[in-house]
Each structure stands twice: as structure tokens, then as C-alpha cells.
Amino acid sequence: MEPTLLFIVEDAFQITGRGCVLVPGPSAEAGGPTLRVGDPIRLVKPDGQVVDTSVRGIEMIGRRPPPKVITAPILLPPEIKKEQVPIGTQV
């Protein structure tokens, strides 16, 4: 089965005490992909390097104005830092 592209990283934030959060995240609208804490995910960096990891958390980030498509940024395990996930990484 071919892996599903959930989203392409537009930014990453390192939050003290939480970890690395990737945005925008997959669509959180009805009919979007189902993603749960603990689910395995694959990060494919722009250089082709692959990192298999999992979802540590689902984040909600308030934005003004509200985006046209509602997304749910994801929190990665603590061993993965912002510097390891460049913009353009496929999740």
C-alpha cells in the first residue's frame, strides 16, 4: 500500500517543555485523514532522507484570521528537534 501524504511542512516550532511541532498539519475537517497519538508517520526530507517516527500529540494553534482549511499541527517525540525537520519535508 502506498503511503498517504498528509501534508508538507511549512514551518516547525520548538516549544520548551513540549517539543517540535510541525505546521500546518493534516486537514482537521470532515473527511480528512484520521491521525491519533501514537500513530506511526514517516518524514521524507527534501534531500530524500527518511525518518520513521510517531505522533506524540495533536496541537491546536489559534490563527487570525482563521485559515480557509482547518488543520491540526502535530507534536513529534522529544528526540526529534526543529533543526532536523526542514521546510518542505513530506509527512
Image (spheres, rainbow, N blue to C red):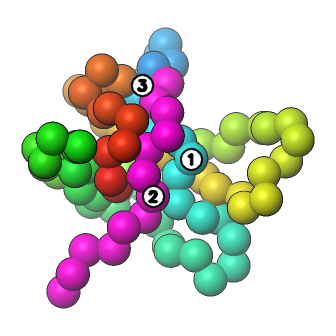
In the image, farthest residue toward the left:
49
Say which amino acid is labelled 1: Pro
Amino acid beneath label 2:
Phe
Q: Quadrant of the N terminus?
A: bottom left
The residue sitting at 42% across, 25% down in the picture is 19
Which of the marked residues, 2 or 3, is nearer the chain's N terminus?
A: 2
- The number of numbered badges drawn on the structure is 3
Q: Residues within 10 Å of mark 3 (few under 14, many from 20)?
A: some
Of mark 1 and mark 3, the one earlier in the sequence is: 3
Q: Position of residue 30 (x, y in %)?
A: 69, 79
Disc 2 versus disc 3: nearer the observer: 2
Of labels 1 and 2, earlier in sequence is: 2
Q: Which residues are magenta?
A: 1-13
Whether the residues at callouts 1 and 2 have beta carbons within 8 Å, the answer is yes
**How far apart are the two marked residues, 1 and 2, measured between alpha carbons?**
7 Å
Binning the other alpha carbons within 10 Å of mark 2 as few (below 14), some (14 to 19) or many (20 upward) gives some
Residue of label 3: 19
In the picture, measured across the screen, residue 77 lies left or right of residue 37, that is: left
- Which residue appears farthest toward the right when viewing the image? 65
Name the residue carrying label 2.
Answer: 7
Residue that mark 1 sits on: 24
The span from disc 1 to disc 3 (Cα, nearest Å) is 16 Å
